[in-house]
Amino acid sequence: RMSWEKPSMEVIMIESTRHSCIQCFFSKLSEAFIFRELNEARDAAKKYFSFNPFVLLPSVLFFGKFYSGLVSFWVARETNNKFESKHWKKIGVECKDEFVKLSVAASAWNFENKSFLLQAEEHFCSRNFETAETLYDAAISSSKIHKFVNEEALANELAGHFYLETGRRHRAVHYFSQAFEKYNEWGAVAKANSLTAFLDYSDK
């Protein structure tokens, strides 16, 4: 017969504090990513990963891997330090691989679009631009089919940044315009308005 000891109040409090910290840093990470605040997203991601956040409830685990993967690929592209870039890309690939495994075991309906978007960002990092283009469009299409308006907006926005950063400003306008429309449809007016600067820049 197996013995089982009730955890002490101290252990319960430590675990509760740990989970609260993970949730806090995940919120900061995802918010900074959504509003394109690179330094804040990077700093929050470092703190988030320091807690080994992937021993969590499934719903938190999925979104944790999704957003931390997106942040990691973004930081990898933006840093000028080759070692740092390689480090962040490695984290992004690990998050992407784990997310894809989880999504296959769970539900294509809920996670297919997110898997496509993580893969698109990975190929953007690796400069496989043609493959990235296909995957951004796949993420947008899957989000639309499965009626995830917010993630359709996000996929369009990231595709816009992809085209902008690869020197195709006029194509970027289309994707940013779609993102602007979908964020407004979702009710995220402040986020939609934050894209007007990118639209103006793209059209110059």
Image (cartoon, rainbow, N blue to C red):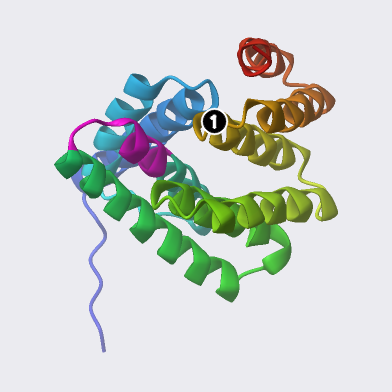
Q: Which residue is mark 1?
A: 167
Q: Residue furthest left?
A: 83
The vertical placement of 67 against 199, above or below, is below
The vertical placement of 76 against 169, above or below, is below
Q: Residue at x 36, y 31 (%)?
A: 25
Left or right, 126 with respect to 15, comes to right
Work out which quarter of the rendered image holds the N terminus and state it: bottom left
Rendered image quadrant of residue 40? top left
Q: Position of residue 202 (x, y in %)?
A: 64, 19
Q: Position of residue 14 (x, y in %)?
A: 23, 41
Q: Residues within 10 Å of mark 1 (few under 14, many from 20)?
A: few
Q: Position of residue 142 (x, y in %)?
A: 75, 56
Q: Residue at x 25, y 34 (%)?
A: 47
Q: Residue at x 68, y 67 (%)?
A: 108
Figure label count: 1
The residue lying toward the viewer, choosing from 140 and 50, is 140
Amino acid on which the number 1 mark rests in the picture: Gly
Rendered image quadrant of residue 48? top left
Rendered image quadrant of residue 194? top right
Left or right, 18 with respect to 137, comes to left
Magenta segment range?
71-81
Magenta span main SS: helix
The residue lying toward the viewer, choosing from 55 and 199, is 199
The vertical placement of 61 against 182, above or below, is below
